[in-house]
Image (cartoon, helix red, strand yellow):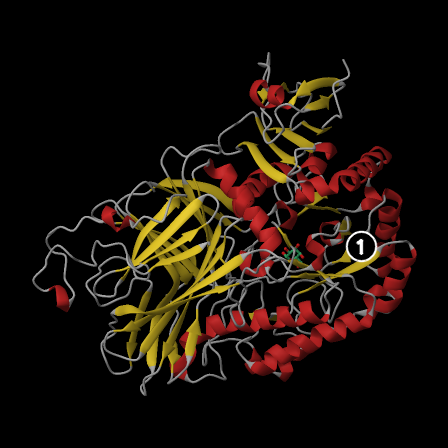
């Protein structure tokens, strides 16, 4: 059984294939956290807690005389404010008119089959016939009718434990939540480093490994989106942990709004990590019998290095988070007209691009920004989702029919969460935009954010989507969101409830997403927020792929893809071949290299196909054929990072291996050139040691390729690249 309650020791032990997680109810009913690490038995690990009089560590009232007990250093399962714990807390809340203080004690548990769901929020789910179990532990405040239910989902085979908390007020006075994290977790030792993924627009998810020092290391976003600047995925690991060895714990928050992940090294070098909704502008009032549900946090532990953690997370997200039926279907190889034309296109130009696309063998044309309202630049039109027929020279239906006749599907860009002040929608409903009363609004990309905490805005958004999808045969939408959210104020909410608006916005967004997914299950939705500004596990519950970055330079994408791979399946990484010199940084790279980089994810093109040379068209055809032949490997293969673009300066390499080892690919992009270069070798991973594979006409055993490695061809030019696919042979030829 994956969840065991030992009534004598009062321990809850959660078992997955490689890890064990344990909690214990102590004599006073405090829920202690006693273990999370490499798989072990159900012994009571509370012996690892050493009671002592450490000085300046406070005692709860029952312990007045026993100074060896203090919640200031005892590891806890869900830490609260007001019981003598001075570290970062999971929960800070107080009843109206009283001091915010809580003291949670054990009040019961329930174990059930299957995985719990969270109303209105993304959550992992059990696969068909997959054995998953749920544990609920109820905690109650010692004095008041405040209840916290801790939820645990145990995916034994997948090595995943999910957590969430539901806070309930049964008092007659309102409960004011100031901070309500999804989880807290205490590691007494061994977690000395923190890996996070910071960035900027056009430079998302840069790998950042920090040694933890005393005090709090915090990352987060207060931008209303999970953001380009930080990402709600982080790793705690040992100082010596590498790709292949060592302990590490991955932590993913299923949330697309402002979030916070904090890790505090305490006075005895233990680490407490908390994660959840950012508390900076958060305040939630619970009236009698109301409850607040936190977003879900997903944990995985391994002692086999960062690569193993990645594959565990990627597989679990692919199978237990992404719901779109597209997750297992071959994604269309598309051409998007954004970098080809920006706002400057006509229906005729689009059809020319489509014609070339059909010639190359692509599957879809995506019409990006600029097709609606009065939108010839990014200063106007958002909110007016009716077609600019003058610009297209025909109706949308007519355009799509012509594209379909060429054998291509049609996709379209939309940015429903936004409004331009120069739009009919804004003129009609100025109060639907979030602005601070009496002040000139703060604009981002010259646009305002619609107030998705309001019911009428949610309904308008659903209706806009229905209307758009009713206009033509649309197979795909790119759902964009192009600003950080400031001036958060809902004119429909009372002044004292404004602290709830940011979270209600995200709940509104999820409601619209849920509506689209259930009403149009076959629609392929690509998430986007100025590239990868909302690349998080919350969004992946609704969309199977996300435009990874507005930076399409193949070399900068090496770092962006590398960072993204730690927390997310590669099948979710939308990546396109674009023109040279690159529009973001002016770099020139070979066409082949751009193709190899873009094949790391959901593959496509984003340039004027009409302007390609015959040689480039030949290469594009070859790339598409190659991708179509091996897409299963790229979509479902296990991903191995073979060299880091942050450490290895000569080349970056990665590999996909089918889970049964039958087929593998290796991709290498050279990032530096040398006169008189040394031979470059690389070791494959994940192959079957005694199987035989053929590489460049020669046979090798899996063991040889993994332990000895293979020799890479010499680079011939700047940013040259190389890619090989090998397959297991029935038996050796000689
Ligand atoms: C964002 C997206 C781009 C493009 C533009 C259109 O920046 O990330 O891919 O769609 O918006 O305005």
Query: How far across and down, in percent of the image, does residue 391 sit?
Result: 82, 65
Which residue is the extreme one toward the front?
A: 8
Identified at 53% across, 43% down, the residue is: 310
Quadrant of the rendered image containing residue 399: bottom right
Residue for badge 1: 365
Ligand 1 - quadrant of the structure image: bottom right
Identified at 67% across, 24% down, the residue is: 691
Q: Is residue 460 visible?
A: yes
Which residue is the extreme one toward the left?
A: 65
Quadrant of the rendered image containing residue 372: bottom right
Count of numbered circles on the image = 1
Q: Which part of the image, by quadrant, shows the C terminus?
A: top right
Identified at 72% across, 53% down, the residue is: 338
Query: How far across and down, in percent of the image, does residue 607 sit?
Result: 75, 46
Q: Is residue 674 above or below residue 336?
A: above
**Horizontal placement of 508 versus 178: left or right?**
right
Q: Is residue 394 visible?
A: no
Q: 587 or 678, which is in the foreground?
A: 678
Query: How far across and down, in percent of the image, does residue 286 sit?
Result: 38, 80
Identified at 63% across, 70% down, the residue is: 514
Q: Is residue 503 above or below residue 571?
A: below
């Amino acid at each position: 059984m994956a969840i065991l309650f030992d009534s004598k020791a009062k321990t809850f032990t959660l078992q997955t294939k490689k890890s064990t997680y344990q909690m214990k109810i102590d004599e006073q009913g405090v829920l202690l956290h006693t273990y999370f690490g490499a798989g072990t038995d159900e012994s009571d690990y509370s012996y690892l807690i050493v009671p002592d009089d450490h000085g300046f560590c406070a005692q709860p009232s029952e312990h007045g005389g026993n100074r060896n007990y203090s919640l200031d250093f005892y590891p806890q399962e869900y830490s609260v404010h007001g019981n003598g714990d001075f570290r970062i807390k999971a929960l800070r809340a107080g009843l109206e008119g009283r001091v915010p203080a809580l003291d949670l004690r054990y009040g019961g548990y329930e174990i059930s089959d299957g995985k719990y769901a969270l109303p209105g929020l993304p959550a992992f789910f059990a696969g068909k016939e997959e054995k998953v179990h749920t544990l609920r532990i109820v905690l109650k405040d010692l004095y008041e009718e405040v209840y916290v239910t801790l939820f645990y989902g145990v995916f034994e085979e997948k090595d995943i434990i999910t957590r969430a908390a539901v806070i309930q007020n049964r008092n007659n006075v309102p409960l004011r939540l100031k901070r309500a994290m999804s989880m807290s977790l205490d590691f007494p030792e061994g977690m000395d480093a923190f890996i996070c993924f910071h960035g900027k627009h056009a430079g998302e998810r840069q790998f950042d490994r920090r040694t933890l020092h005393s005090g709090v290391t915090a990352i987060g976003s207060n931008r209303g989106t999970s953001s380009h600047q930080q990402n709600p995925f982080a790793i705690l690991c040992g100082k010596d942990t590498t790709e292949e060895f060592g302990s590490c714990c991955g932590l993913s928050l299923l949330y697309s709004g402002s979030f916070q992940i904090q890790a505090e090294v305490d006075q005895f070098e233990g680490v407490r990590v908390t994660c959840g909704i950012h508390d900076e502008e958060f305040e939630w009032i619970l009236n009698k019998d109301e409850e607040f549900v936190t977003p879900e946090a997903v944990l995985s532990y391994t002692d086999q290095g960062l690569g193993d953690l990645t594959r565990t997370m990627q597989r679990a997200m692919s199978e237990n988070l992404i719901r779109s039926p597209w997750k297992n279907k071959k994604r269309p190889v598309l051409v998007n007209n954004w970098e080809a034309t920006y706002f400057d296109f006509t229906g005729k130009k689009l059809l020319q691009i489509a014609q070339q696309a059909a010639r190359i063998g692509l599957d879809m044309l995506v019409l990006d920004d600029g097709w609606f309202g009065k939108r010839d630049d990014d200063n106007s039109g958002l909110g007016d989702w009716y077609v600019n027929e003058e610009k297209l020279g025909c109706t949308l239906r007519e355009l799509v029919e012509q594209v379909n006749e060429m054998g291509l599907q049609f996709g379209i860009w939309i940015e429903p969460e936004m409004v331009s002040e120069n739009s009919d929608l804004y003129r009609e409903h100025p109060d639907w935009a979030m602005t601070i009363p009496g002040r000139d609004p703060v604009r981002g990309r010259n646009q305002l954010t619609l107030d998705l905490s309001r019911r009428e805005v949610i309904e308008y958004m659903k209706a806009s989507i229905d209307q758009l999808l009713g206009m033509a045969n649309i197979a795909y939408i790119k759902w964009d969101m192009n600003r950080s959210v400031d001036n958060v104020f809902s004119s429909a909410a009372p002044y004292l409830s404004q602290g709830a608006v940011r979270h209600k916005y995200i709940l509104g967004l999820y409601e619209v997403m849920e509506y689209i997914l259930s009403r149009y299950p076959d629609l392929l939705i690509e998430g986007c927020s100025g590239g990868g500004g909302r690349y998080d596990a919350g969004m992946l519950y609704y969309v199977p792929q996300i435009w990874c970055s507005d930076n399409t330079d193949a070399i900068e994408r090496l770092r962006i893809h590398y960072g993204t791979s730690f927390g997310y399946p590669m099948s979710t990484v939308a990546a396109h071949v674009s023109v040279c010199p690159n529009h973001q940084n002016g770099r020139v790279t070979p066409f082949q290299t751009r193709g190899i980089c873009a094949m790391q994810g959901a593959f496509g093109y984003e340039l004027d196909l009409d302007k390609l040379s015959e040689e480039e068209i030949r290469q594009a055809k070859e790339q598409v054929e190659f991708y179509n032949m091996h897409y299963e490997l790229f979509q479902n293969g296990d991903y191995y990072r073979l060299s880091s673009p942050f450490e290895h300066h000569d080349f970056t390499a990665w590999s996909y291996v089918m889970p049964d080892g039958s087929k593998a690919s290796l991709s290498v992009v050279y990032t530096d050139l040398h006169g008189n270069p040394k031979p470059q070798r690389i070791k494959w991973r994940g192959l079957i040691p005694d199987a035989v594979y053929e590489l460049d006409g020669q046979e090798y055993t899996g063991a040889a390729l993994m332990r000895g490695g293979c020799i890479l061809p010499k680079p011939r030019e700047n940013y040259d690249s190389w890619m090989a696919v090998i397959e297991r042979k029935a038996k050796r030829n000689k």
